Image (tube, helix red, strand yellow):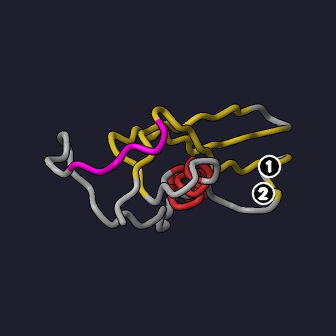
Amino acid sequence: MKRTFLVLLALGALSLGCTHRVGDLSVVTPNASPLKFPVVAERVEGRDCTESILFIPIGNANPTPDAAIDDALKDSDGADALMDAMFYHDHVTTILYNKHCLRVVGTAVRTK
């Protein structure tokens, strides 16, 4: 009986999960947009990263698309949106040190 309980406890611990909100996007389309905006910069890149030591987060617990987009637009004067954006999840995972980044690459445009 005790062994069965320990097996069920171990299976329960392995099946734990969680959900969290990643970010907000105002307009999303899976295909090329029919809208045309003035291009401010081609192929801009931004990222938002989180690091942890021994699985304890340092600073921000989760990278967000909002912060990655803001980072991509910071050097593009007048740009307020990204077109043809692609998101990447980059990570380095070790026992001691972990780094997770959300990276976005796209074309910076002015919508206003």
Residue contact between numbered discs 2 and 1, judged by CB atoms under 8 Å = yes
Residue visible at 42% across and 56% down? 81
Residue visible at 80% across and 62% down? 59
Measured from the top left, where is residue 78 in percent x and y? Answer: 51, 58
Mark linked to residue 57:
2
Q: Amino acid at mark 1?
A: Ser
In the depicted structure, whether residue 26 falls above or below residue 41: below
Residue visible at 70% across and 31% down? 92
Left or right, residue 21 beside residue 83 = right
Measured from the top left, where is residue 108 in percent x and y? Answer: 45, 46
- Number of other residues with Cα within 10 Å of mark 1, as a class: few under 14, some 14 to 19, many 20 or more: some
Secondary structure under badge 1? Answer: strand
Measured from the top left, where is residue 67 in percent x and y? Answer: 59, 59
Total numbered circles = 2
Measured from the top left, where is residue 99 in percent x and y? Answer: 72, 40
Looking at the picture, tell me which residue is in the foreground, 7 or 111: 111
Look at the image and give the residue range highlighted in magenta: 36-41
Left or right, residue 79 beside residue 72 = left
Q: Amino acid at mark 2?
A: Pro
- Number of other residues with Cα within 10 Å of mark 2, as a class: few under 14, some 14 to 19, many 20 or more: some
Residue visible at 17% across and 41% down? 31
Q: Quadrant of the N terminus?
A: bottom right
Residue placed under numbered mark 1 in the picture: 52
Quadrant position of residue 30: top left
